[in-house]
Amino acid sequence: MLLEQPLGQLATRIAGATAVFHQFKLDFCCGGQQSLGAAIAKRGLNQQEVLAALEKLQRQPQPAVDWHSEPTAKLAEYVLNRFHQRHREQLPELIRLARRVETVHSDSPHCPHGLANHLAEMQQELESHMLKEEQILFPMLVRGVYPYGPISVMLEEHQEHGEALRKLDELSFGQQLHPGACNTWTALYLGLRELKEDLMQHILLENEILFVEPKRPGHGDQHCCGSCQ
């Protein structure tokens, strides 16, 4: 029964589910342990509309790559190339656009005051997080070592990233453009939506697959608290 399953599990099992969750504003990354039914009730959504959208996806062919069954090394490489690299491209440009909008439109009631500084803080936190994954955690996972300590730290930081995304929404008014917004403003909000979707997908794959301990190809049987590394 879909309603009883956690959002994170559905997001990694049904191709296209993340787009549905974005549409209905259901948090599938940091709130991924919440059941679909509970999430729908919390937001006061029409249960049948959400279920119909997901059931439609289930009737479609699934993608070739099922990350649940792929080797750890392949998923780690995908995260590095698809998300780490992309975040490093996205944030500097978004910060530049935000500073421009805040400078030119500072007297507008719709101006996202404080957004550029918030994005700069997100950039700093994400860079630190990604470096720890690249230099410490991912190499350990690829070697078959499951380091509980470092993983728990990463999961806590994922929660912080989720809070940062919520603040981003507040500062940017949910990326809702007002009539007559200039091209820079439009580009900024389009980029923010892309960043949100990418970061949520990034966190999802790590929380629900890469940082989970099941016996997948490429996973070893070694365990480590992280203190000996």
Image: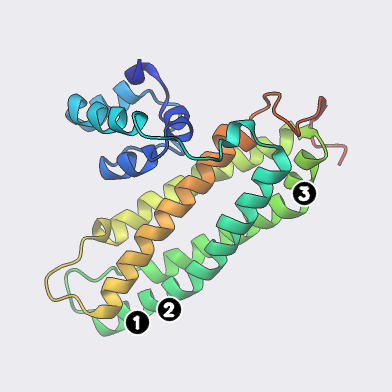
User: Going by the picture, which residue comes out furthest to the right?
Assistant: 228
Q: Residue 113: x percent and y percent?
A: 30, 69
Q: Is residue 205 left or right of residue 51?
A: right
**What is the secondary structure assignment of the residue under circle 1?**
helix
Residue marked by disc 2: 96
Query: Within 10 Å of the Cα at label 1, are there few (<14), some (14-19), or many (20+) other Cα atoms?
Result: some
Q: Residue at x 34, y 25 (%)?
A: 36
Query: What amino acid is at disc 2?
Result: Arg
User: Going by the picture, which residue comes out furthest to the bottom?
Assistant: 104
Q: Residue at x 64, y 55 (%)?
A: 80
Q: How is this picture coloured?
A: rainbow
Q: Is residue 186 left or right of residue 227?
A: left
Query: What amino acid is at disc 1?
Result: Arg
Query: What amino acid is at disc 3?
Result: Ile
Mark pair 1, 3: CA separation: 37 Å
Q: Residue at x 88, y 37 (%)?
A: 228
Q: Earlier in the sequence, mark 3 or mark 2?
A: 2
Residue marked by disc 1: 100
